[in-house]
Image (cartoon, rainbow, N blue to C red):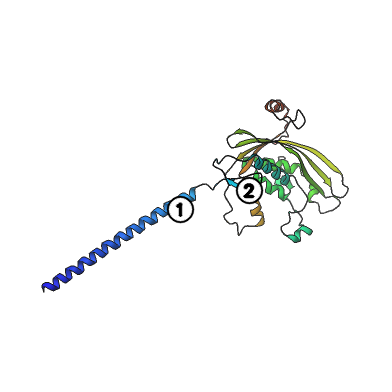
Amino acid sequence: MVRLLEKRQRTGSVLTIFAIASFSLHVLVLLLFIFQGLNIRQLSLRKPPNFVQLIDGKPVGNIDDLAREPEAIRRFISKTMISMFTWSGTLPPQNIEEVANPKSDLGILIRTSQGSSQKISTSTWIASFALSEDFRKGFLSTVAEMTPPEVFSENPNQVMTSQLIIKRVYPPKQIAPGKWRVGMVADLIQKNRVGGEKLVTPFNKDFLVRAVDYFGNPQADNGTDLQKAIYSVRTDKLEIYEIRNLCLLDGYNNLNEDNLKQCGARQTSDSFIK
């Protein structure tokens, strides 16, 4: 009887130790899961690393989230404005077949300040996502008013095209942390595709640009070509939040603070101002 009691006590002690060890192990695993969950949450809330383009086009990490390379800013302005004001009546080719036989651009209807609806090119609409949201709507309304309806004409004898020829983009001048002013001298050339008649309009503008965050397309693999194009516009982590007429008092070579102050009185009502 005594031996039987001792055996039961030993068995109970082993079970108790096993239960305590198992409970401790479960608590430890739970703590590890909590710690790992907190780390994952911190990673999900962390901003994506900021990249800027160098002159050779290679992205490098930058410690300052608001810093951008001057050449990257100038390329951003040039690329955006060329896409904004190049109207060919056709869509950008997506494959080799469309290079030879491009699809017609049906345009996108935009309501103008007069209350009517006019078309802008699809490339203009996509490029407009490089503008700040509060400035974009009014700017598109202005572009719609200056876009000839003949751009979308089905009659080949009436089709007009437009191209922005950039002569110079001035070095960006920082006006605040993460904000720059960039002057551009260009000509907007509208041409009749058949007759070859040209209309050249000076397009000299002063751009106010700022650094912004960028979040990638969460459905990059399943997105349409249009969605991918829109997201690609924001990859430069820059946006234009104001456009003014650029006053050139001394040719194309003198863009200083004194001249810009004198130009302030010459701004007209047709300026692209927010």
Q: Residue at x 85, y 43 (%)?
A: 198
Q: Position of residue 98 (x, y in %)?
A: 75, 59
> In this image, 11 relative to 79: left or right?
left
Q: Secondary structure at mark 1?
A: helix
- Write down the quadrant of residue 177 in the picture: top right
2 vs 1, front mark: 2
Q: Secondary structure at mark 2?
A: loop
> Would you call the spot at circle 2 few (<14 residues within 10 Å), some (14-19), or many (20 or more)?
few
- Write down the quadrant of residue 183 in the picture: top right
Q: Is residue 30 visible?
A: yes
Q: Residue at x 62, y 34 (%)?
A: 174
> In this image, 168 relative to 28: left or right?
right
Who is closer to the viewer here, 58 or 65? 58
Residue topped by disc 2: 58
Q: How many numbered marks appear?
A: 2
- Judged from this view, the residue extending furthest toward the left is 2
Amino acid type shown at disc 2: Lys
> Would you call the spot at circle 1 few (<14 residues within 10 Å), some (14-19), or many (20 or more)?
few
Amino acid type shown at disc 1: Ile
Q: Which mark is residue 229?
A: none
Q: Position of residue 48 (x, y in %)?
A: 54, 48
Q: Looking at the picture, does residue 189 appear above or below residue 36?
A: above
Residue topped by disc 1: 40
Q: Position of residue 46 (x, y in %)?
A: 50, 47
